Image (cartoon, grey):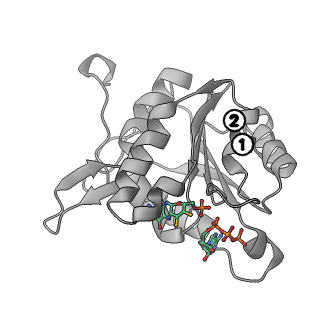
Amino acid sequence: MTACLSKDTLKIGLVSISDRASQGVYVDQGIPALQKWLETALCEPFEVETRLIADEQDVIEQTLIELVDQHACHLVLTTGGTGPAKRDVTPDATLAIAHREMPGFGEQMRQVSLHFVPTAILSRQVGVIRHSSLILNLPGQPKAIQETLEGVKGTDGAVIVRGIFSAVPYCLQLLSEIYIETRPEICESFRPKSARR
Ligand SMILES: Nc1ncnc2c1ncn2[C@@H]1O[C@H](COP(=O)(O)OP(=O)(O)OP(=O)(O)O)[C@@H](O)[C@H]1O
Ligand SMILES: Nc1nc2c(c(=O)[nH]1)N[C@H]1C(S)=C(S)[C@@H](COP(=O)(O)O)O[C@H]1N2
């Protein structure tokens, strides 16, 4: 296992955005799927702040602001509400509270997801920076969490299209100097040689 070198503990906000899960119509699978994937992929302990909320733009905005500004999450992952339906407003809320956009994350997620479903093009998911935090929208299907974070692999396990999490450790390092490593068999992360510790 790779040595964990960060002095600060990584703090991650996990936000499941679903009308029905938040009303108890079905059990939320978003937060458990996010947490499970992170436990598998990250080589070091991390803290989470979780929220299960309805598809209401003002509630989503306030939740993202709270997780970044009050809880100082280095990374916030949302799941759900990225499509074209009227109540799918996660990307709109994310952009409304963003300081800077990171278009590569949305582009790469759609690339990855097109290998799984032709309707991947319907996801309006975005990646943004607020202060020193990275916020990424993942689609709502629980299986989309692993797909987009980990990418597309062949039957032999070889990577066909890289998942977005490959770029997350270096992005966090550039934003807040936190240094995290991933387990390469799950998701190999990259940083320039000069940035490696
Ligand atoms: N938190 C969740 N837990 C379990 N399944 C979910 C969750 N969120 C979404 N799904 C599943 O993925 C599908 C697509 O997600 P999407 O975000 O578009 O939800 P939706 O159809 O707008 O409904 P809702 O907001 O009520 O979950 C849902 O219809 C549901 O089957
Ligand atoms: N990896 C992945 N991406 C996906 C999907 C999926 O199942 N897997 N579903 C697609 C569908 S059907 C829709 S409508 C959009 C938006 O989904 P959301 O509203 O659940 O966020 O995400 C797309 N992206």
**Extreme residue in the bottom direction:** 25
Determine whether 161 is above or below 105 in the image: below
Q: Quadrant of the C terminus?
A: top left
Q: Is 181 situated above or below 89?
A: above
Nearer to us in this view, 78 or 32: 78
Q: Residue at x 44, y 40 (%)?
A: 107
Q: Position of residue 173 (x, y in %)?
A: 47, 26
Q: Is residue 122 above or below residue 91?
A: below
Between 5 and 89, the residue placed more toward the observer is 89
User: Would residue 33 be found to the left or right of residue 95 on screen?
Assistant: left
Q: Are marks 1 and 2 in contact (CB under 8 Å)?
A: yes
Residue placed at 56% from the left, 33% from the top?
8
Quickly name the residue at label 1.
Answer: 92
Q: In the displayed structure, does residue 192 sit left or right of residue 106?
A: left
Which residue lies at the image location 71% right of the left edge and 57% below the top edge? 88
Q: Which quarter of the picture shows residue 152?
A: bottom left
Determine which quarter of the picture holds residue 31: bottom right
Label 1 is placed on what type of residue?
A: Asp
Q: Which residue is mark 2?
A: 95
Report the residue at 33% width, 54% height from top: 151
Above/below status of 12 relative to 193:
below
- Residue that lies at the very extreme toward the left in this rendered image: 156
